[in-house]
Amino acid sequence: MSVPRLLGWAALVLGAAAPFAGNPHRPVQGPIDANDPSGPIAGVEEIDALQLARWIRYREPGLRVFDLRSASDYSDDRIPGAEHVDIDAIDDVVISTADRVVTYADSSAQAAQAGILLRARGPRDVYWLRGGIRGWFDDVIDPYLPADASPEARRNFESTAELSRYFGGVPRIGERSGSSAETPGPPDDVHKTIARARMRGC
């Protein structure tokens, strides 16, 4: 059976089972649409890059991060500790019910759909990364705070900046590095930044 058809069946089966299965984090309500990651997806939740960075830094037990992009993209830039998995081989991944799983891909829908398939294998904590690798670059590697930010926002930014520096990032206040949410893909110097992050042994 092809992967797209398998993903479709997984969405239907898990959608029907959701009212009975429950969710330890957030109850699933309403219809399930695996192609709309902004809505509820059976047992799979959204997570932001900063939370993932905290889990990686503090060695969250059982954390498994799966990069579903191409092998060349994975080789160029990846989140520290992420494992490359071809979307066609998602069923071959060996996971435990105790694992905390995070997926990211070229699209949020693809990451969420892969999460559905992995969730069906037993793990109770399954997440897809909001913004994928781009979200990681913007929020962790190159976080930005406007110069006119409030004192409270500046205080909150201190922990973000500290986390960013741990991963080799460059937090900035009052200036942009050239990266923006509207720019598709990471900035040119991200390859060097991720390479430094890998050297930290995260």
Image: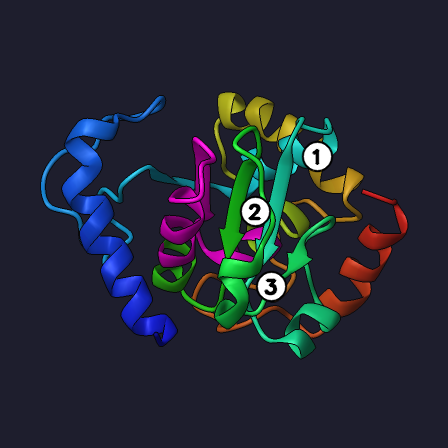
Q: Nearer the viewer, residue 43 or 172?
A: 43
Q: In this view, does 195 lie to the left or right of 102?
A: right
- Mark 3, Cα crowd under 10 Å, few <14 / some 14-19 / many 20+, is many
Distance from Cα at disc 2 to Cα at disc 1? 10 Å
Q: Quadrant of the C terminus?
A: top right
In the rendered structure, which amino acid carries the disc numbered 3? Val
Q: What residue appears at the point 23 percent right and 57 percent down from the top-left corner?
A: 36
Q: Of the residues shown, which amino acid type is indicated by label 1?
A: Leu
* 103 relative position to 170: left or right: left
Instruction: Answer with mark 2 or mark 1, whichever residue precedes in sequence.
Output: 2
Q: Residue at x 49, y 63 (%)?
A: 105
Query: What segment is highlighted magenta in the picture?
Result: 113-137
Disc 2 element: helix
Q: Is residue 124 above or below residue 103?
A: above
Q: How far apart are marks 3 and 1 (CA)?
A: 27 Å
Q: In the rendered image, which residue does mark 2 sit on?
A: 139
Residue 85's tag is 3
Mark toward the viewer: 2 or 3: 3
Residue 132 magenta-highlighted: yes
**Magenta region includes residue 195:** no
Label annotation for residue 163? 1
Q: What element carries label 3?
A: loop
